[in-house]
Image: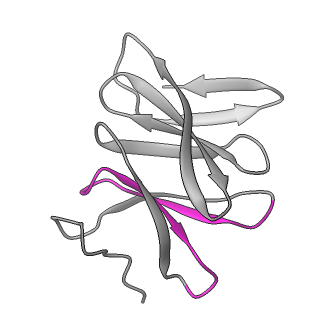
């Protein structure tokens, strides 16, 4: 078992998603702390991105881009760039976002 808690976390971690990009980066969503975390090969947190709300699901879009569905009606697109997590854009929806998947260029959100 590995700890992914960082100093800035206020709550015990609750991992709700895990994703490996095509280039091998491992990302997790921490629902309790509203974060996406980038882990190294020894499962230590190398970087994190603070989200606006609870992350429910995450899916890899391309070699370094993930889409994260959050409760407050949105999707955050986050790219791994030089060991950091950078938000590229957000997508606002008119419903709570629970699940997300990507296939052949299409994004599916429940």
- Which span is picked out in magenta? 23-42
Q: Tell me if residue 33 is in the magenta stretch.
A: yes
**What residue occupies the far front of the structure in this picture?**
82
* Residue at (48, 36) in percent of width and height: 99
Q: Is 97 left, or right, of 59 in this rendering?
A: left
The residue sitting at 48% across, 25% down in the picture is 110
Which residue, as the protein is rendered here, is positioned at the far right? 104
| Location of residue 109 with respect to 35 vertically, above or below | above
Residue at horizontal 77 percent and vertical 43 percent from the top: 62
Is 109 placed left or right of 26 in the picture? left
Q: Please, is residue 94 above or below residue 110 in the view?
A: above
- Image spot of residue 82 (x, y percent): 68, 61
Residue 52 image point, x, y percent: 30, 37
Tell me the residue at 70%/34% (across/down).
Answer: 102
Q: Is residue 35 left or right of residue 66?
A: left
Q: Is residue 28 left or right of residue 24?
A: left
- 104 w.r.t. 3: above or below: above
Q: Residue furthest left?
A: 10
Residue 44 position in % (x across, y down): 49, 82
Toward the viewer: 11 or 14? Answer: 11
Query: Residue 107 lies in what quarter of the image?
Result: top right
User: In which quadrant is the N terminus drawn?
Assistant: bottom left
Can you give x and y, in whole percent of width and height, for residue 83 in the image? 62, 65
């Amino acid at each position: 078992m590995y700890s992914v808690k960082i100093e800035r976390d206020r709550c015990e971690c609750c991992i709700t998603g895990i994703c490996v990009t095509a280039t091998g980066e491992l990302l997790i969503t921490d629902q309790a702390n509203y974060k996406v975390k980038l882990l190294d090969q020894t499962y230590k947190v190398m970087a994190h991105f603070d989200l606006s709300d609870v992350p429910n699901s995450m899916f890899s879009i391309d070699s370094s881009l993930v889409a994260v569905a959050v409760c407050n009606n949105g999707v955050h697109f986050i790219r791994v760039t030089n060991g950091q997590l950078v938000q590229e854009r957000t997508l606002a929806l008119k419903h709570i976002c629970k699940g997300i998947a990507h296939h052949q260029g299409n994004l599916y959100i429940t």
